[in-house]
Amino acid sequence: MVRESFQEQLKVLRDTVVELGRQVETAIDCAMTALKDRNLDLAEKVVMDDEIIDKLSLDVEKKCTTLLALQQPMARDLRLISTAMRMHVDLERMGDYACNISKTVLTLGGEPFITSIDDMLHMADLAREMVRKNLDAYIKLDRELALKTAKMDHEIDHLFGKVFQELMTLMTENPGNIKQSTYLSHIVKYLERIGDRATNLSESIIYMITGDRYELND
């Protein structure tokens, strides 16, 4: 009976991590939709809803601490708990980045874009897909999916370099572009960091499954 209770607590922990991840997916999607559509109400909602992500992250931490203190887990179960401890930190930070994007949208207001944001939207799509696929790998204990997902960050990094350089060029060509270029460069950096954090998720999931640690953020 005690073991059954422990396994049920592990399942609740896993479900909470997944719910946290789903909230982060939504935050990234809504933040970028707010940017694309200049929807300030939606941007404000993302900022307000960051509290939900923070509370879920704290809930994961509390569950992990309780399990470690009361159950004295061994081997694989210990890896499940330590992985949740690592994942909630990365997911919470991704939520912060989505919140920061939304705050930048609010600062930009309705100002027309000085350049295309298509590559930024593509970066966000890739980052959100990385979160989703990592959650699938986490649920299914799929090492290969986690590895494959981490490789998607290379495209995000490539787009980051491309867009950042374009924004720097716009600044040098016309001083009037400096303000918006600076804000857009912040958004691009937040997206690049989300990709890095998503790669951290892949590393944590692989460790949970195999017990081996890999450095995939090169």
Image (spheres, rainbow, N blue to C red):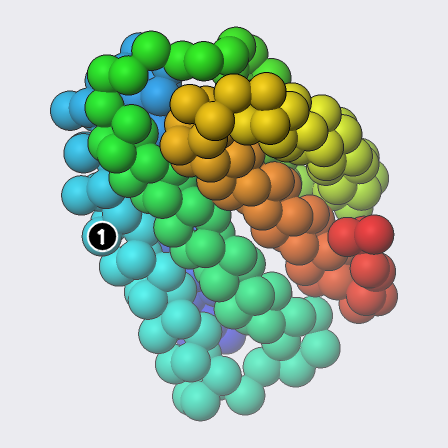
Q: Is residue 15 left or right of residue 142?
A: left
Splitting the image into 4 quarters, where does residue 37 fall? top left
Q: Residue visible at 52% across and 10% down?
A: 116
Q: Residue visible at 45% across and 13% down?
A: 114
Q: Residue visible at 56% across and 41% down?
A: 189
> Residue 188: percent from the left, percent from the top?
54, 34
> Residue 210: percent from the left, percent from the top?
81, 61
Q: Quadrant of the N terminus?
A: bottom left
Which of the pair 132/154 is nearer the observer?
154
Q: Is residue 196 left or right of residue 214?
A: left
Q: Residue visible at 78% across and 34% down?
A: 154
Q: Is residue 74 above or below residue 29?
A: below
Q: Is residue 145 above or below residue 32?
A: below
Splitting the image into 4 quarters, where does residue 72 fall? bottom right
> Residue 19: percent from the left, percent from the top?
38, 44
Which of the pair 75/152 is nearer the observer?
152
Q: Amino acid at mark 1?
A: Glu
Which of the pair 132/125 is nearer the observer?
125
Q: Name the residue tied to disc 1.
A: 51
Secondary structure under tag 1 reads helix
> Residue 18: percent from the left, percent from the top?
45, 46
Q: Is residue 65 left or right of residue 116?
A: left
Q: Is residue 84 visible?
A: no
Splitting the image into 4 quarters, where does residue 136 fall? top right
Q: Is residue 208 above or below residue 183?
A: below
